[in-house]
Amino acid sequence: MKNKKILMMTQASMIAALYVVLTLVANALGLANYAIQVRFSEALTILPYFTPVAIPGLFIGCLLSNILTGCPPLDIVFGSLATLLGASGTYALRRHKWLAPIPPILANVVIVPFVLAYVYKFEGSLPYFALTVGIGEIISCGVLGMILLFGLKKYENVIFR
């Protein structure tokens, strides 16, 4: 039992660390700063399809990423909650492989536009922000996430046992 808890904590920690590193890479490449933001780390929101320990790992990874990249407190809170909701939804839909990226896409499309409009005071409307966030999330979660899902599927019994 103790070894299983250690394994779960280690997996969640590794997922959090990967999320942070991938976010920092996207920021360094300028992919997370424009109208359409592509965070490579959002592809990891597919991981709850394989294991529930990905949920806290993604939440903590997003929380740390937002802190490390200097986001305002409300963005740290609501951006991290969007990731938590999305990851939880992916886990809930784990029996439906093709639906797995939908919850993180929807969570971000609903929450992030409000952050952009009211926290960052960006010029534009909520529908415009929902569209641009949605495009970025479809690329990150829908395309990259599904590539990751199919790549990991072959090794799921080894990695996520």
Image (cartoon, helix red, strand yellow):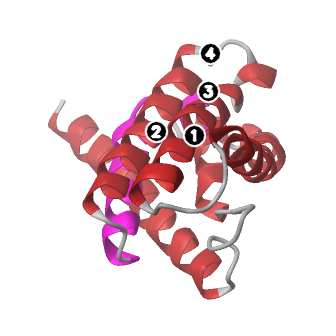
Asked if residue 159 is positioned above or below residue 63 in the image, the reply reads: above
Closer to the chain start, of discs 1 and 3, is 3
Label 3 sits on what residue type? Answer: Pro
Residue 112 x, y percent position in the rendering: 53, 45
Can residue 59 be seen in the rendering of this structure? Answer: yes
For disc 4, the marked residue is: 93
- Say what secondary structure mark 2 lies in: helix
Can you identify the residue that label 2 sits on?
A: 82
Pick whichever of labels 3 and 4 is earlier in the sequence.
Answer: 4
Which callout, 3 or 4, points to the residue nearer the camera? 3
- The mark tally for this picture is 4
Packing grade of label 3 (10 A; few <14, some 14-19, many >=20) is many
Residue 108: give its label.
Answer: 1
Residue at x 53%, y 15% (from the top left corner): 92
What amino acid is found at the position of numbered circle 4 in the picture? Leu
Residue marked by disc 3: 103
Instruction: Say whether disc 4 or disc 1 marks the residue closer to the N-terminus.
Output: 4
Which circle marks residue 27 in the picture?
A: none
Mark 3: secondary structure: helix
